[in-house]
Every structure is written in structure tokens, then in C-alpha cells.
């Protein structure tokens, strides 16, 4: 069964073609970093227009890369549940047009659920139940994935998601956009113990996150260093700040796995690309009876392969939509 996936929730126009839920025939991502870079963050209206300009080209490229044609696809899956409303509308309109003209099923999927399924594309050993840390620019959750479509959210962010904070801090430091990969890269040549930033909510018994205060403590530190005219290396600031975020994510995740007696951890979403997060989690879990799973880097940030993968399981479970499909900017998982 071949599914065409469509993902246009934010600043990536992505089309993928996936066979039987795990064979990625193509996964084309057209990112809009150049469009938004100047503003230091995503401008929703510009994003939606850009999706509209490129989506047909991205569809064409996905078919070319997969070496198949429209008549070969069996269904179309689209993220219609979480993202910027006008951007979602572009993807959903394309999905409806394809479904209608080819007379094939339309499968609505949730963006975060798509991220959770990104690890099923490559990791046959990932089973149920597992604990999923889903961490990106728009969300920061700890989810017990008990079975297909059975989720228990045990931790959420009370304010900003980790990726959002990395993006905002990078903007404050004048590094560029998106901030996560830039801070990751810069941190490699910095001392992560040079400055101490708080590890928010680690003492709490729950699994919630709160990164907004951490952002304030960074701005205060940098302003203080500037006022005192103390010399500092931006690499040390970046590495110390990243370490605070990473340690908080790792500690909370491991604590949740222990308390819920989970043996497998899956980490997904844009921030799961972070090299220090991967390193620390691998290091910590190697000493424990825990398996850890990360998607390949190309499947961490927004992509349509994860949407098509989830679409496959939804199709098998008869969870289909129709041409009345609506878009939702913030539907719960
Ligand atoms: O999953 P995603 O593409 O979009 C959302 O669903 O939000 O994640 C984008 C986020 C951005 O905040 C970006 O800065 C962050 O993922 N990100 C990273 C890295 N690569 C992307 N954060 C830390 N380290 C990275 N290497
Ligand atoms: Zn995402």
C-alpha cells in the first residue's frame, strides 16, 4: 500500500511517498528558513503564501524521486490537526484535490502523533508501551504510548517548548534562525560548565516542563556580562544554556521511565536532532536497562514521511476522513 503524505503545519512544505508504513520512497522537504530568517521567527502569513507557491513543485519532486506516478498511490494522508491555520489549509486543500480526483481515501492525522510515529519508520524494535519525549518548537510532551492511538500525556510544558526557547535565545544572541541547530553547532566548541543556568522543575514530582524562566536567566546573565564589560565567549554561553535544557529533558524523561516502569524511550521532534541530547541520553541509558530510539536526522524536524507512516496505521484501523475535513490549529493529542 502506497501513501502520499502531506505536511504544511509551519515553515516546511513536505511531501512524502511511503510504502507499507515504513519504506520511504521519497521525503521532500522545502524549508522556508530564508523567508523567515530576516524576521528572526516565523511570519504566519508569509509562511502560508510560500506553501502555496511551492506545494505543486514539491509534489512533483516527490513523485520523481519515488519514480512512481499519481495512479500508483492508494491513499493520501494529511496533517490537519495542529499548526498555523492558513498553512494547514494549503496542505489540506491539496490533499482533498488529490483524494477527489483519484478517488482514493483521505486520512487526517495529528502533527504530534506524526512525530511519535517517525520512530516507527525505521525502528522495528520499538514496541508498546514506550515513553515518548516529543520535543520541538511547538510542543514539549512526555507521552506514554500504550498502543497504536493510545496515548497518556504525563508531562507537558507550562510555557515555552524547548525548541521555542532555543530559537528565542538564538535571536537574542544574534545568531540567526532557526536557533536550535545553531546553538547545537556553537556549543560543540564551548564549555558547558562555564556558566550555571537553572534546571527548571527538576525537584517537582510531576513531569511537566517550564523553560521560559531559563530564557530570562540567560538574558540577565548576558546583560550583566555586557554591563560589567567582562569578556565572554558566546560558545560558552550557548553550551552552558544548552546543557541546562538537555539535562532537564533527560532527567525528567529518565525519572518518568523509572516511575512508569518503561523499558523503551523514543525521542522525536526537531530538538531530538540535538547532538548533546542524543549523547547524554545514550550515555545515561547505556548504564540502565533501557532502550533508546531516535529517528534519523532527516525525520526529526517536520516531514511528511511521518505523516504517511501514521496514515498507514490509521488506514488499517479505518480512521478515514472525507472532503468535509476541517483544519484545527491546536487539537489535543
Ligand atoms: O519538529 P519541528 O520541525 O517543528 C515543530 O513541530 O515545532 O521542530 C523545529 C524546532 C525548532 O525550534 C528548531 O530550533 C529545533 O527544532 N531544532 C533543534 C535542532 N534542530 C532543530 N534544536 C536543537 N538542536 C538541533 N540540532
Ligand atoms: Zn513538528
Image (cartoon, rainbow, N blue to C red):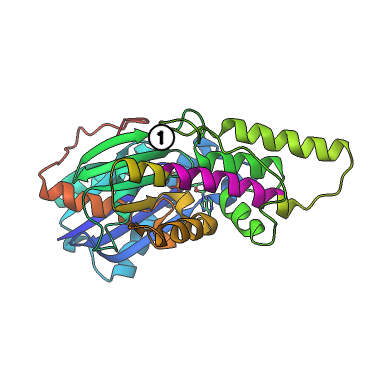
Label 1: state its secondary structure.
Answer: loop
Say which residue appears at 47% left-offset and 30% top-offset.
Answer: 204
Say which residue appears at 34% left-offset and 45% top-offset.
Answer: 258
- Position of 247 with respect to 263 (left or right) is right
Say which residue appears at 28% left-offset and 45% top-offset.
Answer: 261
Where the C terminus falls, by quadrant? top left
Q: In this view, does 242 lie above or below 73?
A: above
Verify whether residue 173 appears in magenta.
no
Q: Is residue 175 visible?
A: no
Q: In which quarter of the image is residue 80?
A: top left
Q: Position of residue 284 (x, y in %)?
A: 45, 57
Q: Between residues 17 and 146, which one lies in front from this camera angle? A: 146
Say which residue appears at 34% left-offset and 69% top-offset.
Answer: 65
Q: Quadrant of residue 73?
A: bottom left
Q: Name the residue under label 1.
A: 207
Q: In which quarter of the image is residue 288?
A: bottom left
Q: Position of residue 275 (x, y in %)?
A: 52, 59
Please tell me how many numbered marks the rendered image carries.
1
Where the N terminus falls, by quadrant? bottom left
Magenta highlight range = 237-252
Q: Is the magenta stretch mostly helix, strand or loop?
A: helix
Q: Between residues 306 and 225, which one lies in front from this camera angle? A: 225
Amino acid at each position: 500500500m502506497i501513501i502520499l503524505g502531506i505536511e504544511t503545519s509551519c515553515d516546511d512544505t513536505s511531501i512524502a511517498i511511503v510504502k507499507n508504513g515504513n519504506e520511504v520512497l521519497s521525503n521532500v522537504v522545502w524549508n522556508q528558513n530564508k523567508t523567515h530568517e530576516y524576521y528572526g521567527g516565523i511570519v504566519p502569513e508569509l509562511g502560508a503564501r510560500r506553501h502555496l507557491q511551492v506545494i505543486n513543485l514539491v509534489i512533483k519532486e516527490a513523485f520523481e524521486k519515488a519514480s512512481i506516478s499519481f495512479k500508483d498511490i492508494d491513499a493520501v494522508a494529511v496533517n490537519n490537526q495542529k499548526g498555523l491555520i492558513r498553512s494547514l489549509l494549503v496542505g489540506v486543500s491539496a490533499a482533498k484535490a488529490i483524494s477527489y480526483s483519484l478517488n482514493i481515501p483521505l486520512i487526517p492525522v495529528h502533527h504530534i502523533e506524526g512525530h511519535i510515529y517517525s520512530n516507527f519508520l525505521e525502528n522495528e524494535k520499538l514496541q508498546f508501551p514506550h515513553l515518548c519525549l516529543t520535543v520541538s518548537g511547538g510542543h514539549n510532551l512526555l507521552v506514554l504510548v500504550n498502543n497504536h492511538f493510545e496515548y497518556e500525556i504525563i508531562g507537558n510544558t507550562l510555557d515555552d517548548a524547548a525548541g521555542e526557547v532555543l530559537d528565542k535565545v538564538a535571536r537574542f544572541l544574534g545568531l540567526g534562525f532557526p536557533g536550535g541547530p545553531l546553538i547545537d553547532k556553537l556549543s560543540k566548541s564551548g564549555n558547558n560548565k562555564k556558566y550555571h543556568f537553572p534546571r527548571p522543575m527538576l525537584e517537582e514530582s510531576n513531569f511537566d516542563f517550564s523553560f521560559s524562566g531559563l530564557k530570562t536567566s540567560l538574558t540577565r546573565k548576558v546583560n550583566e556580562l555586557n554591563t560589567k564589560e567582562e569578556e565572554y565567549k558566546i560558545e560558552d554561553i550557548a553550551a552552558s544554556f544548552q546543557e541546562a535544557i538537555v539535562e532537564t529533558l533527560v532527567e525528567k524523561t529518565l525519572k518518568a521511565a523509572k516511575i512508569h516502569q518503561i523499558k523503551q524511550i523514543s525521542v522525536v521532534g526537531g530538538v531530538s536532532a540535538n547532538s548533546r541530547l542524543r549523547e547524554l541520553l545514550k550515555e545515561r541509558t547505556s548504564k540502565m536497562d533501557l532502550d533508546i530510539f531516535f529517528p534519523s536526522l532527516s525525520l526529526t524536524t517536520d516531514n511528511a514521511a511521518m505523516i504517511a507512516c501514521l496514515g498507514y496505521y490509521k488506514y488499517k484501523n479505518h480512521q478515514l476522513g472525507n472532503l468535509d475535513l476541517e483544519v484545527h490549529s491546536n487539537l489535543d493529542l
